Each structure stands twice: as structure tokens, then as C-alpha cells.
Image: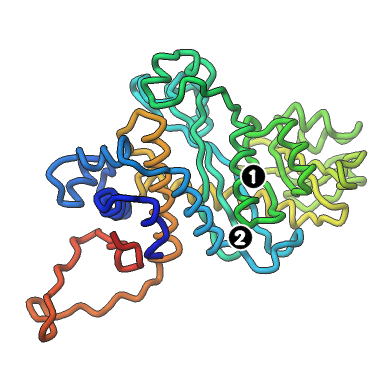
Amino acid sequence: MATLISHRFARAEPRRRVVAYMEGLLSHSLRKNAFALASHAREVGPDGMQRLLRTAKWDADEVRDDLLAYVLRHTRVEGGDQPGHGDGVLVAAQEAFVKKGRHSAGVTWQYSSRHRRMENCQIGLFLTHVSARGSGVLDRELYLPQEWLRDRPQVIASGLRQQASYASKARLTQRMIARALDGGLPRPWISVPERDLWDEELRLWLDGRGLPHALRLAPEEAASLLPRGMTGVLGATGPGRAPGSSSGLNTLPWQTVRLPGTAPGGRAQWLLVHHSAAAGRPEGYLCSGPPATTVAEFIRAVRAQTRARHCLDVLRNEVGLDEYQVRTVTGWYRHTTLSLLAYAFRSFALEGRVREPARTPGRAAFGQRARRAPRPGRTPLTSVGLRP
């Protein structure tokens, strides 16, 4: 852990400050903005923390690669090279960060799935790995809408290269999945809980890579896939066997319908319907996998979304994911990467760590200097190996 990210910083100043930054994110402070983090690090002002996110020389993507490897090292299950044997589930999700102004990178009037309405917000995409060993968020992307990219002076001022091109949410999701596969996950399940995070090109790409998946469908899409006489599966208000569902397998409150035809590689396709009381209406998923795939595997892929949502909620509420004070693309990626890394340390290195018994105040072993105890709420990352 001592050299996990320290080699990404050529100078000692940003190396020390990034440790202090993550310690502040893990503290119990009410706010995690630059002023609070600087105060927690006992710095005179916020300039140093802001410089770390804006102009200091380090690459957030390189630190992201270290984050991805660290999370997979703690969440990947041995023997996961065969479907259904501990591969884990990669869950894609999006988070909206509401803003008052329109000067931050990617901010525009767009739909927020968290608030279920249009908001003036940024949208970040996240990829979480969920397995029997644990869960961790291992990647992130900032969605830049087309209307925002058309404003070239604003784009240049945000720190983005002028020749940057638009990438849809589906393309950003595909990039994150590809990086996770390159990082050592040969054949995980892919779970996408929102319709605008995938498209037909992504689905065919997953089939071509032989990746089993569960992709959320719009209600009208799910209805169009049902064979004639089985529309009651989606019309039911609660769990129960729909009329004419003898050709499908009913595992209340889950129902599956085998779809005709085959996907590339001889893979089969199913329509999975979940009657959720919380959602208020049935949710449909287009699933693909080997013909011998069981219903339990479909359910595991969909239920992994709940654990991924919990990770993102903790990141927002306790690790300061949405409390940044940066406007540039570079600043967003840097803050977000450090937030994910701090959360990973908290999940895999800090929890359950046995603390040394407290020494008598004012007394120290002969020949040793008494160490100053950390302030309440501060979890020193140096004690788990990340030294400045």
C-alpha cells in the first residue's frame, strides 16, 4: 500500500497533500470542500488543496488504474473465470450533481434519474464491482452533453481539449467495462439498471465478448418482447403467475420468459420481469447468457444493483463525492478519483483494523518522541501504509 499511488507524484508536496486530502475525505467533518479539507490538514488556506485538483502535475487516469487494480484485488473471487462461479457483477450507474450555475464542466439542464426530474446538473457515470468478497467502485466518467460541447469557449475554459468529441453514456459505460476486463475480470456479469446507459451497439459488444448481462428495458420495449397472450406478465400489479405463462419460468416475484432465437456464440436470451413494490410497476430486463444459465444468476445480477447503490450513497453522504469546488474537467476527475480511492481504503484497509492501545498522556518510551494523537474524526492513512 505504501507505493500504491506515491509513484504517480514526482514531487513531495503533492504527494503529501494527496494523503491529507484523502484523510479529510474520511474524516467526520460536516463538509468536505477545499476550505474544510485545508483546515483539517492544518493548512493556512485552501490554495494548496485547490492547486492539487487544478494545476499540480499528476494524472488522474493513472491513479484510477491503481484504484481499479486495488479494488479488484480485494473483491475478485478465485475461480471466477467461468460463468456463475464467483465472477462478480459489474454494475453501471449514474449520479447527478445539482449545480446553481452553469460554469462547471458538463453542467446543463438535463434529466436526473436520482431526483426523477429535470435539473441543472452534472452527470457522472460509475462502475461498481460486486462479489461475494465485497463491493467497490472502481471507475468513473463525466458525461459531457452535446449542447455543452457546442459552446467552444466554455469547453476550452473548462480545461478540455478543443478537439474533444461527444461520447454517449453507452460509450462511456463501454469504456469503463473494457478497462475492468483489461484489469483482470475475464467474464463477469454486466448489470445496467437504467435504459439510457446502454444501446444496441453496447449489447452486441457484450454478446461478442461472451459477457452475460442484464440490461434494463423501457416498459414499452419489454411489452414488445413478450409473446402473444403473455402481456399480463407486465400488467400485473403484484407478484403472481400471469395468464398464459406456462412457457416461462415463474420464481415469484421474479418471472422469466425465454425469447426465440439465439445471440452470437449460441447464447440464449430471456426477458426477466421483477415485480417490485418499491418501484410501483414491473421492471423488465433483457438478459443474455449460456443456454444453461439459471434464474438465480439473473436475480443475482439484478440484486447487485442494490449493493452498488449503497456504495454510491456512502460516497455522497460520508466521503464527499459531491462536495467538490472545481469547475474544470480535470478537477472533477481528480476529486472523484481521490474520493473513490479514499472509500476503497475505508472499505478494505481501515474497517476491522485493530488499533494499538492508547499510551499514557505525556509518557513515552525512553529515547522516543511522544507522538501527537490524531484529532477526533481523523483516520491517518499513514497507519495503513500510504505514506507521504
Mark 2 or 1 closer to N-term?
A: 2
Total marks shown come to 2
Which quarter of the figure is the N terminus placed in? Answer: bottom left
Determine which quarter of the picture holds residue 165: top right
x, y (%) of residue 15? 30, 53
Element carrying mark 2: strand
Determine which quarter of the picture holds residue 214: top right
Judged from this view, the residue extending furthest toward the left is: 362
Which quarter of the figure is the C terminus placed in? Answer: bottom left
Residue at the image position 30 percent from the left and 55 percent from the top: 19
Judged from this view, the residue extending furthest toward the bottom is: 366
Look at the image and name its color scheme.
rainbow
Judged from this view, the residue extending furthest toward the front is: 10
x, y (%) of residue 73? 54, 63
Residue at the image position 52 percent from the left and 24 percent from the top: 164
Q: Is residue 295 visible?
A: yes
Q: Image check: 122 left or right of 198?
A: left
Residue at the image position 7 percent from the left and 77 percent from the top: 362
Q: Nearer the viewer, mark 2 or mark 1?
A: 1
x, y (%) of residue 184? 63, 57
Determine which quarter of the picture holds residue 350: bottom left
The amino acid type found where label 1 is placed reads Ala
Front-lying residue, 168 or 251: 168
Mark 2 and mark 1: Cα distance apart in space: 18 Å
Q: Is residue 28 visible?
A: no
Residue at the image position 28 percent from the left and 62 percent from the top: 380
The amino acid type found where label 2 is placed reads Ser
Element carrying mark 1: helix
Q: Which residue in the structure is indicated by mark 1?
A: 178
Q: Which residue in the structure is indicated by mark 2?
A: 131
